[in-house]
Amino acid sequence: MPAIECYGQKIELDNEGYLVNFDAWTDDVACAIAEREGITELTKDRLEVIRFMRQYYKQYRAFPILSSVCKNIHQPTGCLHEEFIDPLRAWKIAGLPKPGAEVISYLRK
Amino acid sequence: MPPKLPKPEELANVNYKPPKKWWQKGTAEIKEGFWCFGSRPKYLQAVDMPNPREWKPTDEDWKLPDNWREIFLEGMAERLQKYRSFHLFMDICVRCGACADKCHFYLGTGDPKNMPVLRAELLRSVYRKYFTPSGKLLGKIAGARELTPDVLKEIWTYAFQCTECRRCSVFCPYGIDTAEITIIARELLNLLGLNTDWIMGPVANSYRTGNHLGLEPHTIKSNIDFMLDDIETVTGIKVEPSFNRKGAEILFVTPSGDLFGEPGIYTCMGYLMLFHELGLDYTWSTMAAEGGNFGFFTSNDMAKKLAYKIYSEAKRLKVKWILGGECGHMWRVWNQYFDTWHGPADFLEAPVSPITGTRFENAKGSKLVHIAEFTSDLIRHKKLSLDPTRNDHLQVTFHDSCNTARGMGIFEEPRYIINNTCNHFYEMPENTIREKTFCCGSGSGLNAGENMEQRMRGGFPRANAVQYVKERHGVNMLANICAIDRATLKPLMDYWVPGVNVAGVHELLGNALIMKGEKERVIDLRGEPLPGKEGA
């Protein structure tokens, strides 16, 4: 199973790069996953997106409607694609488990 | 990582020259970009399906039970006994080839085993070997084949390279429904645990939560609340639907894709606005928030099991009848199977539109009314105020979904709605619409990411017809009445016909609908400026 190093700690990911332990997530872990995903900087706008996703997941155990993310954090429509190209990348950085295949199919642009 | 998708010009160069190799040998070529991941064990376990284990179609060993051949053949014997149609379809094909070039997968791949006649022959040859005297005695001469591991893999490959769209059956002089052969082939494969992750995930979710996406009741409510907020932004009107309300006249059920995906949510907003405007006495159910039924791509028993929640909820909520949203295979199941599985639904009443008084005679058995019938009836009775100029920026064409078109004959109703909500509507060529419609290429559970080349090839004939109306009429919107279409046609258009967008018919209606007390509309349901309101 792949893992990332974060301040000397070994953080486990699954084979597709999703965080295994939801509670192992911290801002630093997010930075390390982001780097693995090819995103070099977690800007304020990006952090807002992933914090919202995490919060949403805790409450609803689901992937949010894409435009609702942008609306809730007062960013322009399409902010997920703008900031992360693929919304699933934001989801991974937020340390959330892989969504079902049908959910993923609806995220495809 | 999904395999890299070749460029459109490479894919469009289809080679129709058949390979020299004799097809009966049974080759299990599992090509990259043409297969979906095998189901994860947890999904099979969730619904008590056989042989849960980790496996991948490209593995040499599919980890089948030792007696897999017996299981398959016993399953076949049972179904030959149980379904006369299957038995008949195994026997009567004369291999005339009328269906050969009617399949979108054959047209898009040039692979002869995608000719419906040959796809069916993969299973027929096994039938002959074990169930007919000529096949038992004469073997290969009689077109019979042993069920070897390679033959099994070949059947799997092509059973999941058919979208059960039934276009071939329109052209068959014997009326053979090759989709039913695929359906049985998939049932038999399911006895060995050979389904895909993309199908079994929604099946397991549906069993647990009542919907394919696994949305829990509070999440469904939250998603609809988000849409209501957007409707208020667009119209100034606060829409307040009810959930799980006992005693409502109508239960409304739609595919869960409309509660989550774009552009499905805009279609859903159209429903919400319409029902509010009518003051319809209806309710949503958070327990049966799914009209679709991936059990249909698994087995008859699983489809039946997953379907019952809808009648069960209708009974619990004591509604009079059920209105169904825009979906494809949901309607195939509702229209052709519900009554047989669960009928008579005599705890419900024969559906009557409370607005127009129209009795939906065609639905008096099942008590299930299609929203395109419901809405077109409203328009015909002049019960809606519509401003089609709000859709004037759209040059619209309509994709008939295979299941609503060939499965239930819904041809005119969506066109009637479009013609009353849009000023610019253009039909695709005659042999690509209505009962001869071309599939989106991704139905029946093939809408995954790892088989994208297969999907783009399968969708090529449909995309080609869209390209035709784009070039002649500047078409920029592909309307449809199917949730799977709304998810699959957008990537298909982006690949083959960039610049064409995708919308459900009730999104077009929502935009054109003049609601009592609404503010001046300046944006559409997607938040884009309406024609002439760009500076507002």
Image: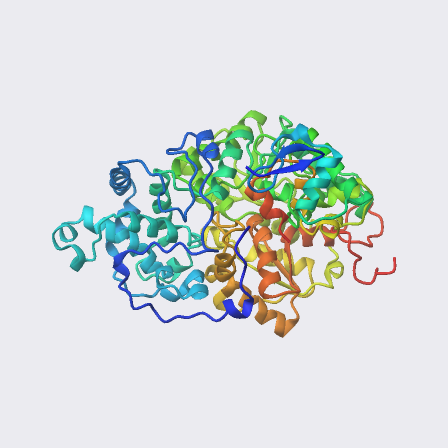
Q: Give the number of marks.
A: 0
- As drawn, which residue projects farthest toward the left? B137
The answer to whether residue B105 of the structure is visible from this angle is yes
Residue B198 lies left or right of residue B133; in this view the side is right
Residue B389 lies left or right of residue A19; in this view the side is right
- As drawn, which residue projects farthest toward the bottom? B472
Residue B421 lies left or right of residue A43; in this view the side is left
* Front in this rendered view, residue A50 or B265: A50
* Front in this rendered view, residue A15 or A80: A15
Residue B514, how many percent across, how many down?
Answer: 76, 51
Residue B8 sits in which quadrant? bottom right
> Image quadrant for the N terminus of chain A?
top right
At horizontal 60% and vertical 33% (from top left) the residue drawn is A20
Q: Is residue B42 above or below residue B298?
A: above
At horizontal 48% and vertical 51% (from top left) the residue drawn is B403
* Front in this rendered view, residue A78 or B488: A78
Q: Is residue B340 above or below residue B95?
A: above
> Image quadrant for the C terminus of chain A?
bottom right
Residue A51 sits in which quadrant? top right
Residue B150, how many percent across, how many down?
Answer: 30, 51
Residue B423, how many percent across, how many down?
Answer: 69, 64
The answer to whether residue B428 of the structure is visible from this angle is no
Residue B412, how many percent across, how many down?
Answer: 55, 57
